[in-house]
Image (spheres, rainbow, N blue to C red):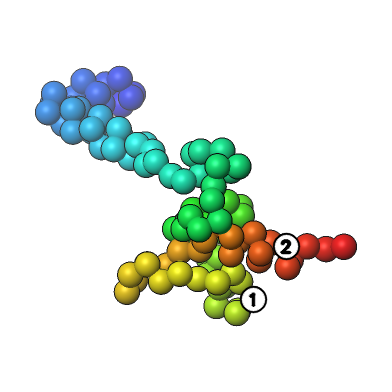
Amino acid sequence: MSLRESELSRSHRAQRAHAKQQKRKHKKHPSALDRPLTLLHDAQVLTFFEWCALNRISARTGRRVLNSGSGPTVVQLSSKRIGITVGANRVWQQSRERL
C-alpha cells in the first residue's frame, strides 16, 4: 500500500486529526534566545533548557555540569524549575576560558 493509498483509506476526520497533531508537534514556542544575544540583560533568567541551548550542550550534560558544582549559580524558580541568569552564565563561561 502506497502513501497515497493509505491517505485515501483514512477517514476525513482521521486526516484532520493527524494534520493537527503534526502542526502541534512542529509548533515552536517563543524563547529568550530568539532575540539577539546583545539584548539579553545580566539579570534575565534563562530556563534550564534555554541555558543548555545557549551553550550548545545537551540537557544531560547540563545536569552533569550543574551537579558537579563547577557550573554557574542556579536560580530556583519554583520547587521543580531552575534557571540561570545571563550574568551568571557569562561569569561561568569566563571562568572556563583557556588561555
The residue nearer to you, when weighing 96 against 28, is 96
Dot 1: element:
loop
**Identity, as a three-letter code, of the amino acid under mark 1:** Ser
Gap in Å between the C-alphas at discs 1 and 2? 12 Å
The residue nearer to you, when weighing 17 against 64, is 64
Instruction: Identify the mark at residue 70; answer none if there is no mark.
Output: 1
Residue picked out by circle 2: 94
**Identity, as a three-letter code, of the amino acid under mark 2:** Gln
The quadrant in which the C terminus is found is bottom right
Position of residue 71 relative to residue 57, above or below, is: below
Q: In the shown orientation, is residue 96 left or right of residue 26?
A: right
User: Residue 24 lies in what quarter of the image?
Assistant: top left
Q: Position of residue 84 (x, y in %)?
A: 50, 63
Position of residue 9 relative to residue 52, above or below, is: above
Q: Position of residue 73 (x, y in %)?
A: 55, 72
The residue nearer to you, when weighing 4 against 82, is 82
